[in-house]
Amino acid sequence: MKKCLLMSLVILMLCGTYVAQGQSIDMCTGDGISKKKIGYSEPAPGKIFLLIPVTVENQGYEEFPLSPYQFKLTVDKVKYDSAYLSYTMSQAGLVPLESVELQDGGKISGYISFEVPASTTDYELSYDTWAWEDYDVKLRKC
């Protein structure tokens, strides 16, 4: 039994991922812009759209899968998914953050949208990689 446990432990160690020194995903976020309406889209009663500008740069990974739908916004201990407003944001003259495979050295910018309570003044943005690989994601304020 100890032999199996030890063998399982070795397999887990071999299946782990390794983050090389100097590799990171730099995510720089600006201040959110609140909107009561974007184009023809309106939030639910008592809510607003919060648009957050983000710039993402791949620093050293072969590629990084990026999706605006992997961002979460925490307001008063409640996590909100991003809202699907790409088409509407484009019509309003804002560039939505795209889903892309970001190659090493690649950089992309755009807005992420959330539908949150109208009283929102304080929030925390996070990113879930949904990946088997451990990426060193550095989310910071610009």
Image: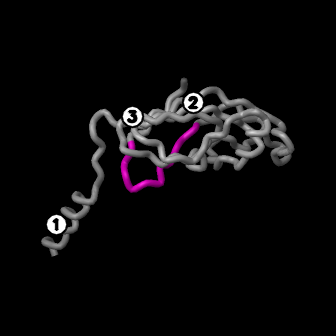
Query: Which of the 4 image quarters holds residue 63?
Result: top left
The one of 98 and 19 positioned closer to us in this rendering: 98
Image-based side of 39 in relation to 13, left or right? right
Q: Which residue is mark 2?
A: 29
Dot 2 crowding, Cα within 10 Å, few <14, some 14–19, many 20+:
many
Which of disc 1 and disc 3 is earlier in sequence? 1
SS for dot 1? helix
Kindly identify the residue that appears in the image at 43 percent across and 39 percent down: 137
The one of 1 and 20 positioned closer to us in this rendering: 20
Q: Which residue is mark 3?
A: 59
Q: Where are the magenta residues, as a range?
A: 125-135
SS for dot 3? strand
Is residue 7 highlighted in magenta?
A: no
| Residue 77 horizontal/vertical position (percent) | 61, 44
Query: Which of the 4 image quarters holds residue 138?
Result: top left
Whole-angstrom CA distance, mark 3 to mark 1, is: 36 Å
Kindly identify the residue that appears in the image at 65 percent across and 36 percent down: 111
The one of 104 and 44 positioned closer to us in this rendering: 104
